[in-house]
Amino acid sequence: MKTNRASLRLSMVPYSLWIILFVIAPIGLIVYYSFFDLSGNFTIDNYKNFFTSVYLKLTVSSFWYAFLITFFSLLISYPTAYFLTKLKHKQLWLLLIIIPSWINLLLKTYAFIGLMGLYGPVNALLESVGIGKQQILFTDFSFVFVSVYIFIPFMILPIFNALDKLNPALIDASRDLGANAWITFRRVIWPLTLNGVKSGVQVVFIPALSLFMITRLIAGNKVITLGTAIEQQFLVTQNWGMGSTIAVFLIVFMVVILLLTSANERGMAGSGKKR
Amino acid sequence: MERNGKLPKIYLTAVFLVLYAPIFYLIFYSFNSGGTMSHFESFTWEHYAAVFEDKRLIVIVLNTVVVALLSALISTAIGVMGAITIHYMKNKAMRNAMLSMNSILMVSPDVIIGASFLILFTLVGIKLGFASVLLSHIAFSIPIVVIMVLPKLQEMSPTLIDAALDLGATRKEIMSRVILPFIKPGIFAGFFLALTYSLDDFAVTFFVTGNGFSTLSVEIYSMARTGVTLTINALSGLIFVITAGLILGYYFISNRPKTPAAGVKR
């Protein structure tokens, strides 16, 4: 077994190097840079700045949009996942739900620019119904809608897995004991699939906090999320210090959300992304 | 369900319609001879021809594919080593620490990965461009490979290795003839996921790409900001076909080796 240990050590090297270089170092650098201002002086001004009204407003609105996006994704995904588990070829249908999520994100977003544009089919429909042309693009509605569209498959997957694992005998038992459909759902189905919902919320809420491409293309810079702010500070203003500070807070929020939504059982990691 | 009313079907149909609407909308107008996405004039292949005539675009597509293939290959190799390292680690605390390190990059928002890598590359002095994009794609693909390979290792019975040792196998043979064949489905799944993650990535690439180097996502982003050209539509038609092909490939490969693996198990 001695040689075996040695070879294990050898296979450890590239992976450990990766952890040090691309996991630990980047986070350390973000924290380090958050203490420098534009001219390279060591300072905690960035943190003071973060607690000014501009950034606080930004954080609150970012959370509000992420909440809306997560809420509507859940509202649409839960019934979808539930109905899917009742279908005959459910795995195939699930695959069909997943396929759009494999199409390049940018292309789908680009399509919505056309779909929701002033001369697009949605407005044509609105006009024929008699509502008339509306400015849909560059509004809060279009931002939330497109984001929900992007995240739905990631929400459906874990919920589908949870519902699929549910023992149907439990539902029968609940009905036999006189519970109606609503009580069965509230007292039996929902608690037993809560872990699926939690990992769904996890894979939607955190990315929703940090969206920046959709805010630019669909919301026309009207919506600014934490992600947009970081991108702005890093690539436009070149203020890496402030950008890093916002990133530090985003990491803190991320950890809190992970703790709040971590499933009780093992196996939550990647459950949203698998398959 | 016996009382399967109409409602579930209508609901699911609506969800599917919305999910596929943008994709088919793009593809539909890629055949439009008129220059816009609102009035369909007549059928044409000209936008597809335009894709193949655009040398810059072809270079970008090649860049994207090369980065995806290379990063998927390298990250699969490192990821498999990582999964084996984690799996055979004796120290439980170290093991859990490694596992959580592994999941950090999986759950980190793209913006943070991009920004922190930008700092890292600038500090170390790596020129922004092909190298930085490739390195970051490798970096964010490794945890995915680990996550896909680990369950396969856990499925494998340790008696298999004991048996191989008893039969006089060297450690090399155990690796190449016992462990690797057993975890092959996981390796393939990891490789294909890494490939698609790389092809799909926008945010990280956007941060670490310099001026001269561009991938498809970044290019589409700047095209979408400047205005509508149906070349993008044609491109998306092509990408849809290729993606569907990749998914089918992944589907068949991940479903195929199940029988021999099950045969080994017993």
Image (tube, coloured by chain):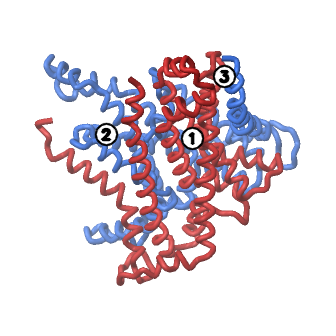
Chain colours: A blue, B red
Q: What residue is drawn where x is 45% and y is 57%?
A: B243
Q: What residue did someone put label 2 on?
A: A81
Q: What numbered label is drawn on residue A4?
A: 3
Q: Which chain letter matches label 2?
A: A
Q: What residue is drawn where x is 63% and y is 26%?
A: B171
Q: Is residue A142 left or right of residue B5?
A: right
Q: Amino acid at mark 2?
A: Ala
Q: Is residue B74 left or right of residue B233?
A: right
- Front position among marks 2 and 3: 3
**Percent x, y of residue A72:** 39, 44
Q: Which chain letter matches label 1?
A: A
Q: Earlier in the sequence, mark 3 or mark 1?
A: 3
- SS label for mark 3: helix
Q: Amino acid at mark 1?
A: Val
Q: What numbered label is drawn on residue B50?
A: none
**Percent x, y of residue A17:** 73, 35
**Percent x, y of residue A105:** 50, 56
